[in-house]
Image (cartoon, coloured by chain):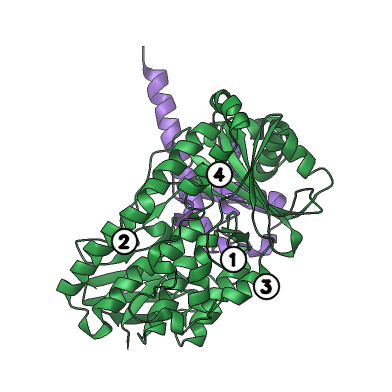
Chain colours: A purple, B green
Amino acid sequence: MSAQQSTTFDRLRAILAEKFEVAPELIDPAARMDQLGIDSLAVIEVIFQIEDEFKISIQSDPGELQTLADLVACVDRLAEEQRARASAGAARP
Amino acid sequence: MAEYDAVIVGAGPAGSTAAILLASAKWSVALVEKQTFPRRKVCGACIAASNLPILAALGIGDAFVRLAGPELRGVALYCGDGLLHAPLPAVPNTPHPWGRALERDTFDRLLLERARELEVTIWQPWSMRAIDGSAGAFRCQIEARTAPALEELRAPVLIMANGSWDGDVENKRHAPRKSSDLFAFKANFSDARLAPGLLPVISFAGGYGGLVIADDGQLTLAGCIRRDFLKACRVAAPGHTAGEAFEMYLRNQSRSLRNALWDARREGRWLGIGPIRPGIRATWRRADGRFMIGNAAAEAHPIIGEGISMAMQSAWLLCARLIAAGRSNASPGTLLRVGADYTREWRRAFASRIYLAAALAQLAMRPWLASTAWPVLTRAPQLMTALASGAGKARVLPTFLGAAPPGGFLSLGEAN
């Protein structure tokens, strides 16, 4: 796991622990969302919180984000794309 | 490896209905469900009277009437400060001419228990991992959800009843993100003030909703809201969940809803899901001959509250044809004819309802537009009754009224 992913994971862990009352000891990258008590009817709330925290727009089908590692990868990819778009915009004359 | 006459994916109302019907006709059936029960669903819980003959034939008619909420005899429209009432259409010449509401955790359990009684093999919680083969010889690889285990199920007939979310197991597609994406929410309330038997529809800017008294006297409030409107709601309600922000917005938008929830207490948290994808998908895949029923085939805008009805009725339409064809005669050619006939009948039964639901949803999400129809609806509230009829609330397909399709299902159920 990269340093950036670790940071993302830590921020996700904070969101899950604070907003969704998930026991911190259960929050592991391999943990499935439903094992954390985040079923398909709660995952939308998690996605909204993550979008607010990371200022990104998650396109994925919630069903595909099955583990925390999936979420971390998705967030990092979107954040990277957003940074690339911002750089491209800044480079324009 | 295990062999069956049919494998059905998904144990919601569509999948369990299909399993019961086929098992009643002595087919060996595997029903694969990835979730454990009871499970919660974002669902308005309404079951129209048009389904009561089906429930009786399935053998759960009496249990449904005993457990469900009061008979739904009236429809109302909440729009801003406005309120209109009209009767709901009744199904003529039946012992139960009105629909009722029953929460999905109870309803799904009733259906699944009936399937179990009929010796359907229930793989739960197992999920579909891969599908190979084609009509006449499907090979399905399923995976246990609670332990590392794989199993192969073989059957000539494969029925996908896996709802809106899992869709195509092999080919996930991403719809582009749009402001008009609809998110659905649902919560239950106790001590609400709503006349039993009334089914109000709420029209508000950016969405629509409905409320009903279901089993145990609890009020079920469910609704949809566009992504852009939901975002504004959340900005206006910092520190609250999206569901709570939705509730605050709804209370602001409708005086009648505020009154209904005046002393009400929410039981549990808001459930949310989305974006929902109403529309017609496919009833039958020509490439490999698998069948689709329920939301896997198509999804109506939930404004008409016909999702459960269409799920069960589509299962009936398909299974009647499969049973008529015969379980020992499930050759690719026979299944091709079944698929073509099922598709034709499905369109006749549901396409107009899906288009009407889409039109009503677009109208309801624009209260300024709905308000232009208000004077007409005030003078002629029977138009609301007619719209409910058009949505299928009292549309009993001839095959559901006593005329048992091949297989003699009615002899296995209760004589209602």
Q: Of helix, strand and loop, which one carries label 4?
A: helix
* Callouts 3 and 4 in the same chain: yes
Chain containing the residue with disc 3: B
Q: Is residue B69 above or below residue A84?
A: below
Which one is in front in this view, the residue at disc 3 or the one at disc 1? 1
Cα gap from disc 1 to disc 4, whole angstroms: 18 Å
Q: Residue at x 45, y 84 (%)?
A: B411
In the rendered structure, find residue B66 and report the number of the disc placed on it.
Answer: 3
The residue singled out by tag 4 in the image is B385
Which one is in front in this view, the residue at disc 2 or the one at disc 1? 1
The residue singled out by tag 2 in the image is B170
The residue singled out by tag 1 in the image is B96
Which one is in front in this view, the residue at disc 4 or the one at disc 2? 4
* Callouts 3 and 2 in the same chain: yes
Cα gap from disc 3 to disc 2, whole angstroms: 41 Å
* Three-letter amino acid code at the position of disc 2: Glu
Chain containing the residue with disc 2: B
Q: Residue B36: which quarter of the image?
A: bottom right
* Three-letter amino acid code at the position of disc 1: His
Q: Dot 4 surroundings within 10 Å: few (below 14), some, or many (20 or more)?
A: many
Q: Dot 2 surroundings within 10 Å: few (below 14), some, or many (20 or more)?
A: few
Q: Dot 3 surroundings within 10 Å: few (below 14), some, or many (20 or more)?
A: few
* Callouts 2 and 1 in the same chain: yes
